[in-house]
Amino acid sequence: MLYRAGKKKGVTYQDIKYLIMARSDAYPLEILEVGSNSWKYGCDYISLFKFENSLKLDEMQDDPYLEGWNALNAIFRMQVYSTKEKYWKRLNELLSALNPDYKKFLGKFDRKKIIAKIKTEMEFETELIKNIHVMEKFGFKLEVIGRQVHIGSGGFIDVLCKDKNNGEYVIIELKIDKANRNVFGQISEYIGWVMEHKAEDKHVKGILISRGLDNKLAAALKTNPNIETVELKEVLSELGMKLK
């Protein structure tokens, strides 16, 4: 679970807002990205559930069943904490009471299925990198520069390329499911990072390969012509692949 603390639009928050799952080992954050009292390491993760009604710090402190929980005693300062099962169960009870949909989510949650999905994305990524020439059919003549490129402030660029025609950087983001609006912000962040750290503020393009787009993402993409989309099934066909 992800605890957050901060202020937005004049409102201070200290709460558990997301259930997340790590999808990478820990990696060091760039020195310039962190202060002396900040995290020195991070990891790539996926968000499994957003709590519309978050669990607030004072609610946790007032709950007798959470007494003795090490993370709460330290007010979640600067550490990752191992949580005993009794505290984990209580947190889920409290969050389920606040968010009825979360209880349904837990009933259907399949950790193995999510891990299998991550592995499938990695297999697709590997085949695409080995056969990057297939992107020529979609108008992109690319050279692979890197894979899972860490951007320093958190997150990874799936595939970083250069356009063979003009030498410009190209970011490829892979999604084996339908892409949602969050992907727009993700790719935009990656483009900005490459412009600042590698491209010297020159033009950078993003390519999203996914199993379609939701309506909100489709609308957002109309505002940025530097992000293009390619249908997943068409790339799989060129690679001679079928997803499990």
Image (cartoon, helix red, strand yellow):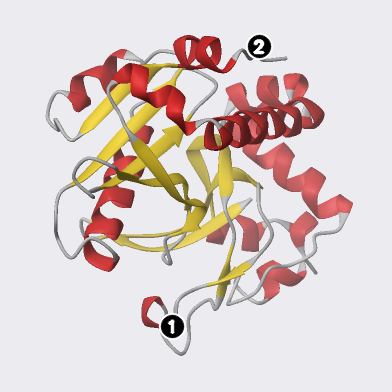
Amino acid type, residue under disc 2 in the picture: Lys
Q: Could you tell me residue 193's position as x and y percent?
A: 29, 59
Q: Could you tell me residue 99's position as x and y percent?
A: 57, 30
Q: Is residue 196 left or right of residue 80?
A: left
Vertical placement of residue 171 versus 42, above or below: above
Q: Is residue 182 left or right of residue 9?
A: right
Which of 32/71 is in front?
32
Q: Quadrant of residue 62?
A: bottom right
Q: Is residue 124 left or right of residue 171?
A: right
Q: Residues within 10 Å of mark 2 (few under 14, many from 20)?
A: few
Which of 50/205 is in front?
205
Nearer to us of marks 2 and 1 is 2
Residue at image position (53%, 9%) is 237
Residue at the spot of label 2: 242
Amino acid type, residue under disc 1 in the picture: Ile
Q: Could you tell me residue 49's position as x and y percent?
A: 57, 34
Residue at the spot of label 1: 31
